[in-house]
Image (cartoon, rainbow, N blue to C red):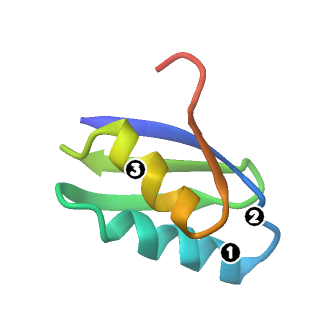
């Protein structure tokens, strides 16, 4: 399963790493790709969108399921 998230508040490589680490920590996540320029994260695995968004928000960034999901 692939989940696309729109991430707000990222401004640098450190932000990308923080979001990536938070998402990888969610049980069921197999792979994560974060695109700083697009403000998006693509997550592969069985984790629920709610769990993914909660992990990102705990790091201080905004997260929502991308339109069209």
Q: Residue at x 28, y 39 (%)?
A: 48
Label number found at residue 7? none
Q: Which residue is drawn at 56% across and 78% down?
A: 17
Q: In this view, does 64 lie to the left or right of 37?
A: left
Location of the N terminus by quadrant is top left
Q: Which of marks 1 and 2 is nearer the N terminus?
A: 2
* Residue wearing tag 1: 15
* Residue wearing tag 2: 10
Q: Is mark 2 on a helix, strand or loop?
A: loop
Dot 2, crowdedness within 10 Å: few (<14), some or many (≥20)? Answer: many
Q: What element carries label 3?
A: helix
* Residue wearing tag 3: 52
Q: Is mark 1 on a helix, strand or loop?
A: helix
Q: Is residue 56 above or below residue 40?
A: below
Q: Are marks 1 and 2 in contact (CB under 8 Å)?
A: yes
Residue 5: x %, y % from top left: 54, 41
């Amino acid at each position: 399963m692939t989940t696309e998230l729109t991430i707000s508040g990222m401004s640098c490589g450190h932000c990308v790493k923080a979001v990536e680490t938070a998402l990888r920590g969610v049980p069921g996540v197999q792979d994560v790709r974060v695109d700083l320029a697009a403000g998006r994260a693509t997550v592969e695995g069985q984790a629920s969108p709610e769990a993914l968004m909660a992990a990102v928000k705990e790091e201080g960034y905004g997260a929502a399921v991308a339109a069209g999901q």
